[in-house]
Image (cartoon, helix red, strand yellow):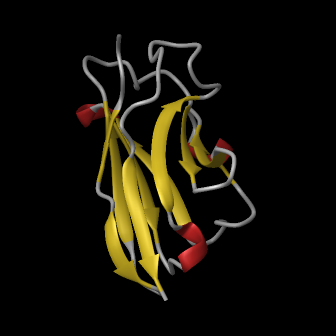
Amino acid sequence: QVQPVESGGGLVHAGGSLRLSCVASGNLLSNLAVGWWRLAPGKEREQVACTRLTADKNTYADSVKVRFTVSRDPAKNAVYLQMNSLNPEDTAVYYCNTDPPLVGPFTSWGQGTQVTVSS
């Protein structure tokens, strides 16, 4: 069972920043669209960002546009999510996966990384 590995979460005050990382073995992320999702208590999992194979095709949820930036580093087989101007509504567990999820090499969700934003 292959899973991506997310890291970089933590506890920050409102207005702060975090950079999340998503890595996988081999070159599993290199030629696929990769998205970031978040799951908050009592809410459904939502996609917040997705990086396509060309940066001008990256997409963002309206709630994070301008504040979040998704990028990839092919040399490190990694995808990042830079999150700025965080607010308490961003509190959630963040996951990465292919887009669409669970239909590519990652047959399950990873452990995710917890982001907690205090007011």
Q: Look at the picture and state if 103 lies above or below 74.
A: above
Classify residue 110 by image quadrant.
Answer: top left
Classify residue 10 by image quadrant.
Answer: bottom left
> Residue sitting at 26 percent across and 17 percent down?
26
> Residue sitting at 67 percent across and 42 percent down?
57
Q: Look at the picture and state if 1 lies above or below 111.
A: above
Residue found farthest to the front: 42
Residue 20 x, y percent position in the rendering: 36, 55
Q: Look at the picture and state if 104 lies above or below 72.
A: above
Q: Would residue 64 appear left or right of 119 to someone viewing this image?
A: right
Q: Would residue 16 appear left or right of 98 to someone viewing this image?
A: left
Q: Look at the picture and state if 61 lies above or below 119.
A: above
How many numbered callouts? 0
Residue 77 x, y percent position in the rendering: 30, 31
> Residue sitting at 71 percent across and 56 percent down?
61
Residue 37 x, y percent position in the rendering: 57, 45
Q: Would residue 89 appear left or right of 72 to someone viewing this image?
A: right
> Residue sitting at 39 percent across and 43 percent down?
112
36 and 79: which is toward the camera: 36
9 and 60: which is toward the camera: 9
Quarter holding the N terminus is top left
Residue found farthest to the right: 62
114 and 57: which is toward the camera: 114
Residue 106 x, y percent position in the rendering: 45, 18
